[in-house]
Amino acid sequence: MLNSSPLTLHQCIISLEHAIRVISWRLKDLEEKDSLPADFPIKAVIHAIKIIARNNIFEWGDMYFLQLLGTAMGTLSAVMVWATLYYAYYEVHKLIPLHNQHLLYFI
């Protein structure tokens, strides 16, 4: 069954500040669990994420814009960092604790 409820633009946007906070929490979770390399530069990575997120300039026609809402999904950082780390935090802290008994894991 498909969900055909209309979405507004605002419902599709993850706040930059919220996403930065959640991604920082996820990286710190991984660090506490020793799931990152010993010399992983966590502070530098979080700082870089902030710079990239807050300074995305895109071209549309012959004009340039500073993106103020959401993340430019066509950028490498959006897929590799933003979406993966943001959703991983949600999965680990919300979905798994709530639905673990209904999940089937494949190894």
Image (cartoon, rainbow, N blue to C red):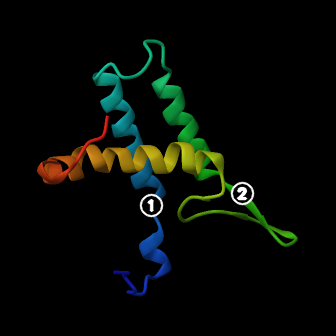
Splitting the image into 4 quarters, where does residue 1 fall? bottom left
Q: Residue furthest front?
A: 106
Estimate the spatial distance between the alpha carbons at disc 2 and disc 1, rounded to whole Å: 17 Å
Residue annotated with mark 1: 15
Crowding around mark 1 (Cα neighbors within 10 Å: few <14, some 14 to 19, many 20+) is some
Residue 101: which disc?
A: none
Helix, strand or loop at mark 1 = loop
Please, is residue 104 above or below residue 9 in the view?
Answer: above
Q: Name the residue under label 2.
A: 57
Q: Which residue is nearer to you in this view: 56 or 27? A: 27
On the image, the x and y values in percent for residue 15 come to 44, 61
Q: At 29% from the left edge and 23% from the top edge, which residue is drawn?
A: 32
The extreme top residue here reads 38
Q: In this view, does 107 lie to the left or right of 69?
A: left
Kind of element beneath mark 2: strand
Q: Which residue type does callout 1 highlight?
A: Ser
Specify the quadrant that holds the C terminus: top left
Amino acid type for the residue under numbered disc 2: Ile
